[in-house]
Image (tube, grey):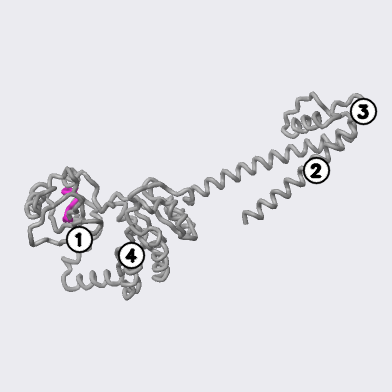
Amino acid sequence: MKTSRYIRFGIILGISLIIYIGLLHVLILYESIHPEAGINNWHNAIWWSITTLTTVGYGDLVPITTTGRVIGFIFLIASFSIYAILIGLISSIMSKLREEKRLGYGGTKWKHHAVIVGWNKFAQSVIKQLLSAGKKVVIITNQKDAIDFIHENYPANSVFGMHSELKTPEVLDKVNIAKSSAVFVNLESDTEKLVFMLNTKKIYANLNYITTLDNSDLKPTLLEAGATYVLSRTEIAAKLLASYIFEPDVAAFNEEIIAVAESEQMYDMKQYRVTEDNPYNGKFYNKVFYDIKEECNAILVGIVQCNNGEKKLIKNPETPITITKDDYLLMLINGKAEKLVDKVFQVKEGFEE
């Protein structure tokens, strides 16, 4: 497409140049006959043509003969066309640049953001939860309407939309996927998700890939393909529905804690990384359990130990465990307690690579 456009432009430019040289040649030919003519050589002819075409018109050189004035009239009319073409070209370039920016073709350099590949109603629900947790989100979609929706409904400093028909490494590099905290594969079919996972995992092997499945039987296959977490929306909905049937209060509480707390009275399950300066670094888990409850009114429910890139989740450990740097503490917490925990831990909630 671009090649044919360049060829067409080259042909037009070549024809225009031939006409330009031909007219100047005729002009010199007729003007040089007249004794008072100043446009009698190529140097003067080119100078006169440039001042005429740019509408500067110094008046130092003018055609004397009838043929010369006809050619001058042609150049004068051509100058209007040139300006119209230039203005149209500049407007087209500016419009194209604005459109490319709107569609996100320039990409983003965000870090520790979530990347969502694919757009639908479910993606909107996920974005809502991520924004509530203070997370930046990048969406890659082949739907141009979705880009309009993103610009109209989300803050530009938190949500970035990119339109692309392909999910190639070049496209993924533009959204800085290598520095993202997680990639949610939200394509239409389970087959598309599997293909994307197999292709992408070869290049970006160390990323956290999360996806949902319509067919829960494919979960082992997706995990084998490189997915970090695979969720079945049917299974989650079925478990929650069953829980509402025989233990509705537990179900209501579970539904609350798996989402971001929308008020200070609501509870949420959060995880925080233990830094070198964390006051709980080097202390026993059981001691920290009581300290966090007393100081922050948060309930410690587990610990994630990270050794050589491997994560091990220990829920409510029975044996004595010493909390060390880069471990993650999991706790049940409400909005009021969250402010106290943030102050103590001095890090953002969530997992960091």
Give the residue at the far bottom of this rendering.
Answer: 217
Residue 269 place in picture, x, y as percent: 20, 57
Closer to us: 154 or 97: 97
- The amino acid at mark 1 is Lys
Q: How many other residues sit within 10 Å of disc 2, few (<14), some (14-19) or many (≥20)?
A: few
Residue span colored magenta: 330-338
Tell whether label 1 touches label 3 (CB within 8 Å): no
- Of labels 1 and 2, the one closer to you: 1
Closer to us: 106 or 266: 106
Q: CA distance from mark 4 to mark 1?
A: 17 Å
Q: Is residue 341 magenta?
A: no
> In the structure shown, which secondary structural element does the residue marked by tag 4 occupy?
loop
Which image quadrant for residue 30? top right
Q: Quadrant of the N terminus?
A: bottom right
Dot placed on the residue nearer the N-terminal end, 1 or 2: 2
> In the structure shown, which secondary structural element does the residue marked by tag 1 occupy?
strand
Q: CA distance from mark 3 to mark 1?
A: 97 Å
For label 2, the residue is 19
Q: Which mark is residue 227?
A: 4
Q: How many other residues sit within 10 Å of disc 3, few (<14), some (14-19) or many (≥20)?
A: some
Q: Which mark is residue 312?
A: 1
> In the structure shown, which secondary structural element does the residue marked by tag 3 occupy?
loop
Q: How many other residues sit within 10 Å of disc 4, few (<14), some (14-19) or many (≥20)?
A: many
Q: Which mark is residue 34?
A: 3
Residue 273 place in picture, x, y as percent: 21, 50
Q: CA distance from mark 3 to mark 4?
A: 85 Å
Dot placed on the residue nearer the N-terminal end, 3 or 1: 3
